[in-house]
Image: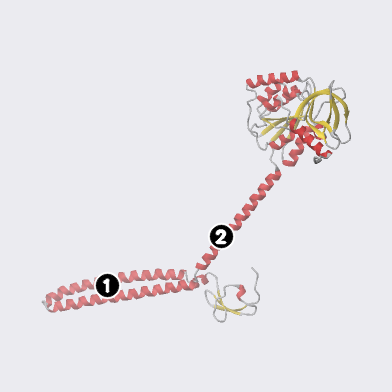
Amino acid sequence: MASPTPQALSVSQLNQRAKQTLERDVGEVWVEGELSNVSRPASGHVYFTLKDDRAQIRCALFRQRARFVSAPMRDGDQVKLRGRVSLFEPRGDYQLIADAVQAAGLGELLAAFERLKAQLEGEGVFANARPLPFPPRKLLILSSATGAAIRDVLAVLEARWPLADVTLIPVPVQGAEAAPAMISALALLNRQARLDPERDVILITRGGGSLEDLWAFNNEHLARAIFHSRLPVMSAVGHEVDVTLADFAADMRAPTPSAAAERLVPDQNTLKRQLEHQHSRLQRAMQARLERDSQRLDTLHAKLRHPGEQLNRQRQHLTALNQRLNRAMQQTLSQQKAQVTQLSRRLASQDMARLHRAESERVSQLQRRLGSAMQRQLESRQARLKAAARELNAVSPLAVLGRGYAIAQDEQGQVIRRAEDTQPGQKLKLKLGEGRLSVEVKRRLKT
């Protein structure tokens, strides 16, 4: 019996598996070799072959990374490149996708960089970490006036924070004269009394390049000048993979010039969104407050009583006080009469002449006391009556009318409280502080 035919892969499936295996197992590597067949088509990508005396591999450097490579990349150049091994599936070509290219022979420069870095670190030159003002009042930029770095920084600043006050101090950023020029510029800025360390910032920046291109930023004296700067310094030299001594000596490092600009100033769009959010919160809070106060006003309005009701209560209270006063006076008179009667009976049983004199004096005294007591009682009751009358008058609608107000009533005597309760041509009666008027409604006015 014939064995079943195994499941076959398509060519694209095979190439896809091969690509995944290469990228997973080999990954990113550094490779050194000689350039050959360098090609630069209109797309901006760079295609070339990297070879040694026994083998070669096709390579591709795409446009996004090619603009950061400063090496000339000519046929025959000896280079080191960093990349990841992959496979171009449509043709099945095994290739190396490059990310960075350096001229070979940089070992001594790297060793010198590490020695100087260790020395300066031991001396504390890399200890700066002062907070930078955000945003700065003045941003002082040390960079090339024509480089891509300053264009990137200015573009980001314009997009994020157009209010930024930027001063460019043009200096060379490559070559033997670069480090002395930057040191002189730092010294000049730090001598200016108008610049405030609490509000102003110095940004030292340039675009990417090879180790030789960036070597000016590894100058020992420049690193010390940055460390001793009175004004805080941010360094943004090269790209994220590039690190210089200036980066270590600065108060803050940014991986790229654009990233430096983003860290130095806020994003106006973010602030606008925050302001809009706060504005919405404020509107909601105001609406809630208005609704709460409206409910409170409705509650108070429901508790408000007509002045007539208060007047009736005061009138009833005054009547009760008057009745109590009359009863008290009657009771006092009755008591005094009873005493007089009792004394008269006692007088009849005693020596009339002597008792008459004594009792006459006593009666006279009691009459005087009674008169004084009645007078005091009457004055007290009158004072309370006057106070009650004043309180009654204070809430009386007539008192309000006396201040220029009027009470409008329809022909049935109902009080008119709103203009909407009337009709044009309707007869109304107005009660004033003094007198009454008969009026006719011509039209209702809008409030």
Q: Residues within 10 Å of mark 2 (few under 14, many from 20)?
A: few
- Give above or below for 211 relative to 322: above
The quarter of the rendered structure image containing the C terminus is bottom right
Q: Position of residue 429 (x, y in %)?
A: 57, 78
Q: Residues within 10 Å of mark 1 (few under 14, many from 20)?
A: few
At horizontal 60% and vertical 56% (from top left) the residue drawn is 286
- Give above or below for 198 relative to 120: below
Q: Hey, what amino acid is under mark 1? A: Gly
Q: From the viewer's side, name the closer residue of 397 and 355.
A: 397
Q: Residue furthest left?
A: 351
Q: Is residue 371 left or right of residue 422?
A: left
Q: Secondary structure at mark 2?
A: helix
- According to the picture, the residue beneath numbered tag 2 turns out to be 292
Q: From the viewer's side, name the closer residue of 273 and 441.
A: 273
Q: Position of residue 88 (x, y in %)?
A: 83, 35
Q: Residue furthest front?
A: 1
- According to the picture, the residue beneath numbered tag 1 turns out to be 371
